[in-house]
Image: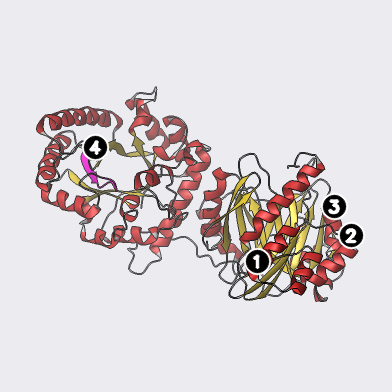
Amino acid sequence: MRRSIATVCLSGSLEDKLYACADAGFDGVEVFEPDLVVSDRSPEEIRALADRLGLTLDLYQPFRDFEGVPEALLEDNLRRARERFGAMERLGVRTVLVCSNVATATDGSDAVAVAQLRRLGDLAARHGIRVAYEALAWGRFVDDYRHAWRIVAEADHEAVGVCLDSFHILARGHDPAGIEEIPGEKIFFVQLADAPALTMDVLSWSRHHRLFPGEGAWDLGRFVAHVARAGYGGPLSLEVFNDVFRQADTRRTAEHALRSLVWLEDRAARLPGSPPHLRRIADVDEPLGFDYVEVKAEDTGQVEAMLEQLGMTFRGQHRTKPVRLWSSGRARIVLNEQHARDEAPHLAGIGLQVADAAAGVERARALAVRPAVRRTQAGEHAMAGVVAPSGIEVFLDDRPPGDEPAWVDEFRHGHDDAGRRPGAVTAVDHVNVSHGRDAHDEAVLFCTSVLGLRTPPATEAAGPQGLVRSQVVRSASGSVRLSLNVSPPGVSHPEHVALSCDDVVALVRRARERGLRQIPVPDNYYDDLRARWGLDEKTLATLRDHQLLFDRSAAGEFWHFYTPRLGNLCLELVQRVGGYDVYATDNTPVLLAAQDRLDHDRGATVPGR
């Protein structure tokens, strides 16, 4: 199906938006009337620009507060429509969006709405224009798409049909299955938006908190499948009101938007009974595990010292690059000093073990994700990679589970025996990635659409400098977990790599003997543990003496600690006991406050990249 987007989704001038939409790969756009009003280009110039860019102008919107009004006001509304139709003819747009009346309607009878829409249809037909009537979720008398369709069906006018908007339908909890009862030729336009599950007035929810498909709580794949089964063959168009998107980079948002639409059509195409004209892209299975984590800096010496304190094994330097490998069990940390002038330690990349790397790359290409390119010498193992929204490079390696990757041989420094000792690091448990608020939704979509990960509910934690929002994305098995964090504006919390072990007490004892420092935990925290969990004095003493944090769920326990930051990175050591499968979010404020105290005590600005 053709892919379109409303210009209201993007920042910038109308011309900027058209260029961005064309570059991203959209087929057409909805022209939001205020974008035209403030433009210094004539409608004819906008039309010519769209033609040159290969874009169709699919919809002119919105036309508000038309039906259900007294006769005198109706005449004025028809005058307004006549003027708008003139502008549409100059633009070359043949469909107008008419929203159900929210402000001026005084008569809620369907008969009045039917008669008045017929008159609008007569006027539109004389200009070669179609009217797409949409039930707004906060419409005064019409707030249900099924009600809007009954009015359109009764009007029985060739120039009057319905517009179906996923937000207005799903925000009210209406069942979209009824869409299949509407003849496809009477569905004049389809608008799509996702949204988080919020409890608030629907108007504010709509105007500020819509999301692109795949980023919210709704099953839009099923919605699109209903539309397709009804016989609709027009554009699938995004209409997303969101304060972040309308302030973000125009081109990046357009690329992000198209990715969501490609993902959505693929998702709908996979549902039973979906029509064949819905396009599918390459299959992707969720990752099987972490292959490696890459840390980059001009000087990685301090990170190496910390890994040695934790008992990990140095596997040697790469034979052609200033890159070193440390490992223990299935945990592999790559330290990269290549092209890192003036850079403090930071998370630069992750490798993921997958069943089919070629299929993953093909899917990423279909989703217009930027490839990550690295030079390899003859005889070196080549892996395909992509760049995540945060800038981290993600490389895919398809090797049998349990096998050591082929690229490890390029370091030539013997075998890892650290992971066999009791209390040793055994694997990468999860990776915490930080990014700005404007990249968060894009990052979630990247992880779900490209990597095939799942999204449990998001959480928030209070730190000394404001709330930190966290969204975990993970595989079903838990072998891959990424925590996507958004810090308050102007605050730089470190990213961290969490390493798992089977005896965190033994590990921290040996690491301390080698000089490891930990994030200090206040005594008040342990008093709180006693109150919350009723821990015995021996367990509390063990936790306090080793500066360990603790959490418990119905399935098991979680013991962990953090190292101080090095640049923009810290390490977390974790032990999951029993079936514990969450992330001790109640401990996050303790971490944030302790890190803040350490940063303040150092009296230095937090290092960046």
SS of the residue at dot 2?
loop
Q: Which-is-in-front pick, marks 2 and 3? A: 2
Residue name at image x 25 percent, y 36 percent: 64
- Mark 2 vs 4: CB contact within 8 A: no
Quarter of the image where one finds residue 376:
bottom right
Q: Is residue 135 magenta?
A: yes
The numbered dot on residue 531 is 1
SS of the residue at dot 1?
helix
Residue lying at the far top of the rendered structure? 40
Tell me the distance, in whole angstroms, between the alpha carbons under discs 4 and 3: 64 Å
Residue 152 in view here: yes
The numbered dot on residue 302 is 3
Residue type, mark 1 in image: Ala
Residue segment shown in magenta: 130-139
- Mark 1 vs 4: CB contact within 8 A: no
Upstream in the sequence, badge 2 or badge 1?
Answer: 2
- Compared with 27, 233 (above or below) is below
